[in-house]
Amino acid sequence: MTAAEAYAGDRVRAVWHRYSRRGDRTSAGSRAYTAYLVVLFGAFFLAPALHAAGTSPALFSLSAPGAATSVSCAFTVTLCWSAQLAGRFWGPLVLQPFVLHVFTSTDLPPTAYLGGAARRRLRYAGTALLLASCAAAYLTTDLFDDLGTVPQAVAVAAGAGALGAVAWLWGQVRTPRDNLVLASAAGATALLVTLTGHRIPDAGTGGLWLVAVAAATTAVILARVAFRSLRTVDLARLARESSRASQAQTYVLTGTLHHALDLYRPEPRGFTSALFRPDGRLRGHLAQGAVRALRTPGRTSAAALLLLAGGALLAAGTAGGPALPLWAAGACCVYLGSGRVGETWRGLRDELTLPPLFGGRWRGTLARGLAWPAAAVTAGTLLGAGGRWRGTLARGLAWPAAAVTAGTLLGGGAAAATRWPQYDAHPADTALLAAATIVLVLGARFLREMKSNLPLSLLLPVMTPFGDLSGLLVVAWQFDGLVTVVLGTALLHAAPSAPVAAALAAAIATCCAWTGLRRTRSVW
């Protein structure tokens, strides 16, 4: 048996060796350019952020009894859930399609060629999560201010990193039912550890040790079960995931990140006949958006959760002395939810970019594509744009604006109802700031969704005293919507009053809408 296993390992290493010597492997220049961008990011962004965090008060103080335990449990269980979800789309067993085809065409067992890759990638993922968790705790909390809590904080980060890495593998190799069981068990365990940590006399340190031990123990148990499942992994599904991942990598390398994300959109199913009335005519714009949202229930459920969470965070961040971290987090949640609330964004982009069949009148296109988004997110804020493209915007944005607005208002109303004393001071300013943020988010989402191919001008060198910064411009173009939301929220936070912030949000949203229309060549 030992000789057979050694022989299988030699064959796997031989395949990897032959594949690594192919002619299209990454050149030394490409690796040097990647390292150069990493050094630029560390020198101009990471180092100043670490210095500012070390010389300023922490954003979140965890000195209260039991606060560190509660936050650590919430962070650990959120990381576990996120890793499971990531594993369902892109797990550690995803290989190059050619290599996977070679392995599956032989008599080698799946554990021989998948086990080594899984262990190696889990080590990388655990290390990355450990470093990222420690950096985030250092930048946002006061756990590293006292040398007595540093070992406990590092232990929690290590346990959470190990659990997140194993949950990443679990999400790929186990069935959806097993993933739901793990998610429920992780939530129940986190609640139990939180309640137990509050009963420990020294809750500030003992609770953190309890969280670290619970996370590490769970990671060890899950790892044993997950690695035993490698022998029964669905190779056909793994081949499809690897093919899709390879295509997505090609899109990312060529600069079209939104095309790579389109590969992971769920296929609509069901409710096809619901788009039509009994007499054969299409239903209204809002009804069409709602039906299309129901055709992708998983995506719509995620949008509802993001909008509710975003509304709650917006209400907490804009009431009674705005808190920028909560405000920015709520805006980002609403931004992400506004894109998943329906498929009308893509239809609007396609109708605006494709040549019309019957002349150049395209105002109906915007109305048809934006009706549901606008009604969902901002209750028709963009519907008053007026002019020749008013009908097109109304049709395209009605459902997104309505859905996003409804979800955000529900989340904000729930937060206000549970913590009502904080909202007695300036309820009108809170509502105005939340509405201004929704308008800003819709403008940023419109800007992002009207994006097509990578502009050739971004590939030209941008020479500065620090070198060529064209790579940073490409990254900024890929995430322009998110960058607009974060910077716009910071500007709204710095505004002297709520009316000024609302006017500033309207101006930014107008600029985003105009730029988005220019991207589709609808205006010049």
Image (cartoon, rainbow, N blue to C red):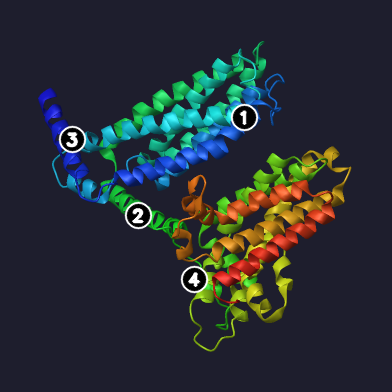
Relative image position of residue 340 (x, y in whole percent): 56, 57
* Mark 2 closeness class: few <14, some 14–19, many ≥20 residues within 10 Å: some
Q: Is residue 52 left or right of residue 416?
A: left
User: Label 2 belongs to which residue?
Assistant: 244
Q: Earlier in the sequence, mark 3 or mark 4?
A: 3
Number of callouts in the render?
4
- The residue tagged 1 is 51
- The residue carrying mark 3 is 13
**Nearest the eye: 97 or 128:** 128
Quadrant (top left/top right/bottom left/bottom right) for the C terminus: bottom right
**Callout in the foreground (2, 4):** 2
Image quarter of residue 266: bottom left
The answer to whether residue 269 of the structure is visible from this angle is no
- Measuring 39% from the left and 36% from the top, which residue is drawn there? 170
Residue type for callout 3: Arg
Of badges 1 and 4, nearer the viewer stands: 1
The amino acid marked with disc number 1 is: His
Q: CA distance from mark 3 to mark 1?
A: 45 Å
Q: Mark 4 highlights which residue?
A: 272
Q: Which residue does the image show at 37% across and 28% down from the upper left? A: 223
- At x 67% / y 81%, what residue is drawn? 388
User: Is residue 141 shown above or below 436?
Assistant: above
Q: x, y percentage for residue 175?
A: 39, 42
Mark 3 to mark 2: distance in Å?
A: 25 Å
Percent coordinates x, y for residue 225 in the rendering? 35, 29
Q: Quadrant of the N terminus?
A: top left
Q: Residues within 10 Å of mark 3 (few under 14, many from 20)?
A: few
Indicate the quadrant where residue 440 lies. bottom right
CB under 8 Å between callouts 3 and 4?
A: no
Residue 18 visible in the picture: yes
Task: Give SS at disc 2.
Answer: helix
